[in-house]
Amino acid sequence: MYLIKPLLLSTLLLISACSLVPVSPSASGTLATQPASSYQQQISLSGKLFIRYEQNGKAQQLPGNFDWKQNAQNLVIDLYNPLGQTIARITQTAQSAVLEQQDKLPLQADNLEQLLQDSLHFPLPVSGLRYWLQGQIRAANGQLSALSAHDQVIETDGWKIRYASWHQPGVPRRMELSRYTTEAGQVSLQIILEAPSSP
């Protein structure tokens, strides 16, 4: 049960950071984009997740690892503690979303939004992380644009997201997300992605 609840909470908060409309650049500059030519429906990514949040007025820090696998319809996220032990799996299909945790009954909902509501007991907007992890942004009309591969910040739906470094264009290496929440105070997430491999 090591790290399950806080790591799961922060990961679900991470997933909730995906509402992409509106998108604005940071105050320091303009949003740098290029035509979205590198988006892939099917990818497999692995990385590290460093989490900072508040609990009972005290700052907390947690490390973790994750695997992310997606295709056009399905998404599977496996969460691990620093020892490499699996602590949870989140699966989304066209029909349902399921949260599986060790020594607990699976929690199922019609969609990922409802699963988050049932897990965290408050609603969160969910869409588009499958684009963000590839350095893409999605406009209200559904059009994709690829962020240029340099250090830049975008802001959306109360979240500030910094693309701090890149493996190459279309392949982020380090992302930093932050926002204030009433449930966990100031939440900061740092994602360090390995170079993607073919699924």
Image (spheres, grey):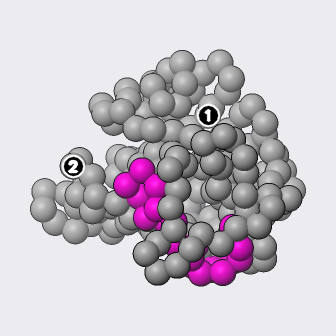
Q: Is residue 156 magenta?
A: yes
Tell me the chief SS of the magenta region: strand
Residue stretch in magenta: 147-166
Identify the residue position indicated by label 2 in the image: 182
Q: Which residue is mark 1?
A: 91
Alpha carbon of mark 1 to alpha carbon of mark 2: how far? 27 Å
Identity of the residue furthest to the left in this view: 57
Q: Answer with left or right where residue 71 lies relative to residue 62.
A: right
Residue type highlighted by circle 2: Thr
Secondary structure under tag 1 reads: strand
Disc 1 versus disc 2: nearer the observer: 2
Residue at left offset 78%, top offset 36%:
72
Residue drawn at point x = 65 percent, y = 72 percent? 32
The residue at the point 42 percent across, 50 percent down is 157
Q: Amino acid at mark 1?
A: Thr
Name which residue lies at 52% across and 78% down.
Answer: 29
Nearer the observer, 150 or 51:
150
Residue 11 visible, this orientation: no
